[in-house]
Amino acid sequence: MSFKPGDAAKGASLFKTRCAQCHTTENGGGNKVGPNLFGIFGRKTGQVEGFSYTKANVEKGVTWDENTLFEYLENPKKYIPGTKMAFAGLKKDKDRNDLITWLKDATK
C-alpha cells in the first residue's frame, strides 16, 4: 500500500486532534515535544535545527516524502525502532492519506 491523495480538510482535523499538541507546521514555528514539521517533504530524518532527536531517528537516514510518511505514520515505533515519538500511529490508510495531503500544503 502507498500514498494516494486524500481529503485535506479531514487531514487538517486529524492534525489538530492527533498531532498539534506535539508539532507545529508554520515556517519559523517552534519545536514542541516533537519537531516543527515545516519543510518536512524532502528532508532527511532527524534534521530539524535545535531539536533533540534520538540516535535511531538521526541514523534512520530516510528522506521524508508521501510514501515514507505513509509507512511511518502507520506505526512510528516499528518504522524507527528507538524513536521517542509516543504516538501509536494512524492505522487506517484513509487517515494517513488525508493527513499527508494536508501536510503537503501546510508545511511548504
Image (tube, rainbow, N blue to C red):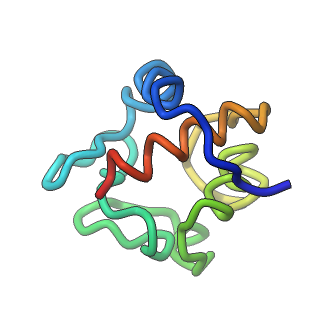
Q: Who is closer to the viewer here, 62 or 56?
A: 62
Quarter of the figure with the C terminus = bottom left
Number of numbered discs: 0
Q: Who is closer to the viewer here, 80 or 9?
A: 9
Q: Position of residue 1 (x, y in %)?
A: 86, 54
Q: Residue at x 41, y 23 (%)?
A: 16
**Compared to 21, does 65 lie above or below?**
below
Q: Who is closer to the viewer here, 10 or 68?
A: 10
Q: Who is closer to the viewer here, 46 or 25?
A: 25
Quarter of the image where one finds residue 61: bottom right
Q: Residue at x 43, y 74 (%)?
A: 43
Q: Position of residue 105 (x, y in %)?
A: 36, 49
Q: Residue at x 62, y 47 (%)?
A: 5
Q: Position of residue 49 (x, y in %)?
A: 25, 68
**Compared to 61, does 82 lie above or below?**
above
Quarter of the image where one finds residue 85: top right
Q: Position of residue 41 (x, y in %)?
A: 44, 66
Residue pushed farthest left? 28
Q: Residue at x 72, y 33 (%)?
A: 94
Relative side of 78 to 66, left or right: right
Quarter of the image where one finds residue 55: bottom right
**Compared to 54, does 18 lie above or below?**
above
Relative side of 67 to 52, left or right: right
